[in-house]
Image: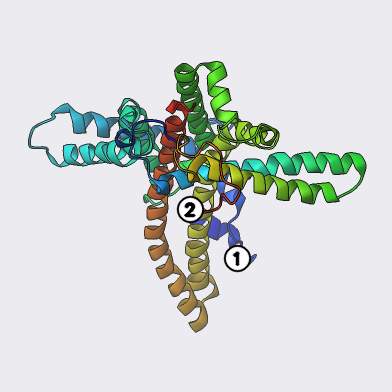
Amino acid sequence: MSTHLLAAEGSGFQSPGPGDFEFPPIFGEGTFVTKPMLIIVLMTLVVAVFFYLSARRAAAVPGRLQFVGENVYGFVRNQIAVDAIGREGLRFVPYLATLFVFIVALNISGIIPFLQFPATSRIAIPLFLAVISWVIYNFVGIRRQGLVGYFRNMMFPSGIPWPVYILLSPIELVSTVLIRPLTLTLRLTFNMFAGHLVLLLFVLGGEFLVFEKGGVVGIAAGSVSLLGSIVLTFFEGFVQILQAYVFVLLTALYIGGALVEEH
Amino acid sequence: MSSEAPDDSGRGAQTDAWGALSLVVSGVLVWGGVGWLLSAWLGNPVFVAVGLVLGMGAALYLVWLRYGRPEPGSTPEPPAGGRTQ
């Protein structure tokens, strides 16, 4: 964080921007191993260890970790999978729960001290997760309804005069094939991007006002900004969990829609 | 939306609403895009506006069709004044 401050010294305050999402390589040349990537590796390990430990000694009277694990899994199972897909959704709970915990972990890394960067604000990660969801809902849809039936049900909803299909069918096709994964990706990416940017602005701006600008006004305004950043951090935590929920819920909805046979 | 037994799926309108966004975006993009192409071809900017409005309208109709109307079996033809809840 303070590197930004040093860079800003002497030249006035530099507001945080997209450049704060570009990290230099940690080892050697190239851009392969960067901070976001290390966060992903770390969080993947954390998620794996969390699930392993919470399920390892599954007891009738759950310990604390097992309790948390079971509650997260139960939440995805009951509030997302069964709610959006129906009883058939139970098949997809392992994927949905993993997706949920993984996204929460990558989002929440934005407010964990020392990590302090939501890895999901790099578009490649939500994009790839969206592609996985895209493959799954299209695959189960085609397997359930057949290739022709899947696209027929998707593009030609029943009960409307046929000329209207000219107007509606392209919309459905583009929506399912292109816009759904795109909105999944962009919603998550830019929620995390904007949230991180706002936090940076409050913290760096407050830091600058208190320690650089100084004076009564500077210290007062900077203190308000720094206090506000604490409130915003909690708000960010809420948004980060909410966005993970939305991503998984939409994935479940798309799977549910692909499984429903309309006649 | 669902031809399953009603007790089999607990699908709620609240969760359905999230799925409507991509339809609306898609409608505006598709027909706005067609309008934009027509405008570029014929040199008349009115097609963009018509396309955008048409796409939005069609998408909203589609949202109602997918998420708003009663079970497909009960109303084979959507009534002309189909905006009633």
Residue A114 in sight: no
> In this rendering, do the residues under marks 2 and 1 share a single chain?
no
- Disc 1 packing (10 Å; few <14; some 14–19; many ≥20): some
- Disc 2 packing (10 Å; few <14; some 14–19; many ≥20): few
* Residue nearest the viewer, comparing A242 with A263: A263
Residue A257 in sight: yes
Q: Vertically, is B17 above or below A44?
A: below
Q: Which residue is mark 1?
A: A13
Residue at the extreme left: A61
Q: Quadrant of residue B38?
A: top right
Tell me the amino acid under the disc marked 1: Phe
Residue at the extreme bottom: A216
A237 with respect to A220 (left or right): left
* Residue nearest the viewer, comparing A72 with A28: A72
A108 with respect to A254 (left or right): left
Q: Secondary structure at mark 2?
A: loop
Tell me the amino acid under the disc marked 2: Gln
Q: Which residue is mark 2?
A: B85
Q: Quadrant of residue A81?
A: top left
Q: Secondary structure at mark 1?
A: loop
